[in-house]
Image (cartoon, grey):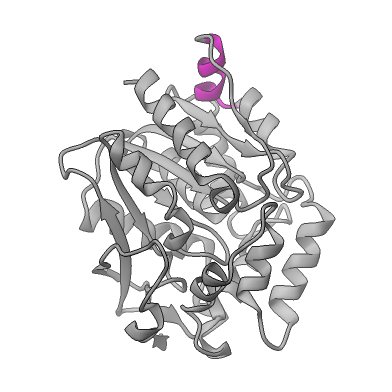
Amino acid sequence: MQTLRTPDDRFAGLTDFGYPPHYADVPDGDGGTLRMAWVEDGPADAPVVLLLHGEPSWSYLYRTMMPPLVAAGLRVVAPDLVGFGRSDKPAAIADHSYARHVEWVRALVFDALDLQAVTLVGQDWGGLIGLRLAAEHPERFARIVASNTGLPTGDQDMPEVWHRFRVAMQDSPEIDIARFVASGCRRGLSNAARDAYDAPFPDPSFQAGPRAMPGLVPYRPDDPASEANRSAWAVLTESPTPMLVAFGDSDPITAAMGPILQRTMAGAQAWVAAGHEHPVIADAGHFVQEDAGPELAAAVIDFVRATT
């Protein structure tokens, strides 16, 4: 597997993201290893919140959520998915698969970091991967926060806006990463943030991950990942693990999934049965962390405290 590694100087001077990176090697599934990056903050013995980003962002997405979570006494761990951020980038689209991304994150957070009693916060692909891990390794998770995400099986079609995004990411000669992130925000994106989202990708050869991910979403019933996701649904619909569904109010891609999660997942039903509500975060698009990071962090903190 040919891999690329973004030079460190591409990440110099990031606004409001001075966390030093940490690195660990994970098996690449092809006989070699990949270096995965993460940032973290908070006491090592505090309850851990695992912040998983999606496509085409990286852990920088969580920069406004990390400080309030740490101030609330939590430990935060925010990895970069393989192909994104400071993590290694397989150069071929074919090197990426849904199963490999699940395994790469599993190897990092369980084998390398040995995280226990995890509170998952998963958005976009962070949820597609995180929900699979929560179903397949329930003993590792204390809570689940699903934000603008889902667990597609291909049994229902994806929205037309998503299909347009998939085609654009796969077919465009060059991807404007910052533009795609900005298009998923309601409150705008600063120039500094645009630079940060472009930083991991010095040229198009580094963009195999962003190009690959839309095609890995199971949007047909016979997709290679469909059966594993159906199995995960079956587990999570019966799982007692508390689940908070915290969606933005203005995400055309995942909006329909929020109510489905609320009414089908046992942990989400139990939250309502205990007298709570699932928050709808106002004026927040697909990248709810960009639009309303502190609001989402507050919802996570309240959820952790209520279920401790």
Compared to 293, does 39 lie above or below?
A: below
**Residue 114 shown left or right of residue 261 in the figure:** left
Nearer-the-camera pick, 135 or 249: 249
Q: Quadrant of residue 120?
A: top left
**14 on left or right of 167:** left
Q: Which sits in the foreground, 254 or 108?
A: 254
- Provide residue 86's location: percent of width, then percent of height: 37, 74
- Extent of the magenta region: 265-273
Quadrant where the image shows the C terminus: top left
Q: Position of residue 131 (x, y in %)?
A: 49, 43
Between 271 and 300, the one nearer to me in the picture: 300
Q: State the image coordinates of residue 267 (x, y, percent, origin top left).
A: 49, 23
Q: Is residue 48 at least partly visible in the picture? A: no
Which residue occupies 56% across, 53% down?
A: 290
State the residue at coordinates (57%, 36%): 233
> Percent position (x, y) of residue 182?
66, 64
Is residue 112 covered in magenta?
no
In the image, residue 114 sits, relative to residue 179, either above or below, namely: above
Return the residue nearer the eye: 163 or 70: 70
| 139 relative position to 203: left or right | left
Q: Quadrant of residue 156?
A: top right
Q: Which quadrant, please, contains the N terminus? A: bottom left
Q: Is residue 120 visible?
A: yes
The residue furthest right is: 160
Give residue 30's quadrant in the image: bottom left
